Amino acid sequence: MVPGFENASGIWVENTFTLKYFDPNWWNAGQNFEIIRYADILLMYAEVTGDAQYLNMVRDRVGLPAFGAAGYPSELYPTLERAIEHERRMELGMEMHRFFDLVRTGRAVEVMQSKVDGDVIILFPIPLYAIDVNPSLTQNPGY
């Protein structure tokens, strides 16, 4: 956690936030790039192949018990799918993956329904320019 930061105008802002990566030139809008982590690749590969060895590579890196081994919380994450979901949540926390993981696996409404009042919206709005170009498009519900 970082106790604060100096913004572009040089003013110190007292605020606590998580800092996983710092770009010293963050205010320059020309700096737009993705950081893809090896752990993310391994967890995606475990999901695609259904092979726990890739999940276990991520866990082994930090000395945690392997999926299916003694000491692994199998009562909480009994299937490989739930184990990968949990591992992605822990490993990629604060990196904006969770919601998209839940939508991709079809669990967004189930998981999010207990967290919010009302309907869970899992679709983004269709941009107006796309509707202007193709009038047969209709806006997603909720927008």
Image: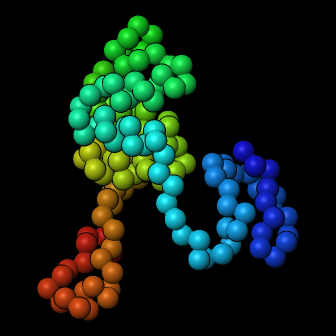
- Residue most toward the left? 136
**Quarter of the image where one finds residue 139:** bottom left
Q: State whether residue 41 appears in this view.
A: yes
Q: How many marks?
A: 0
Q: Where is residue 91 shown, x and y percent of the image?
A: 50, 37
- Residue most toward the top? 70
Q: Quadrant of the N terminus?
A: top right
Q: Where is residue 122 shown, x and y percent of the image?
A: 31, 59
Q: Is residue 34 left or right of residue 143?
A: right
Q: Is residue 65 left or right of residue 104?
A: right
Asked whether 1 or 140 is in front, the reply is: 1
Q: Residue at x 43, y 50 (%)?
A: 97
**Quarter of the image where one finds residue 111:** top left
Q: Residue at x 33, y 68 (%)?
A: 124
Colour setting: rainbow
Q: Where is residue 25 shown, x and y percent of the image?
A: 70, 68
Q: Is residue 83 left or right of residue 50?
A: right
Q: Where is residue 85 shown, x and y percent of the image?
A: 36, 36
Above or below: residue 61 compared with residue 92: above
- Residue most toward the right? 11
Q: State whether residue 89 appears in this view.
A: no
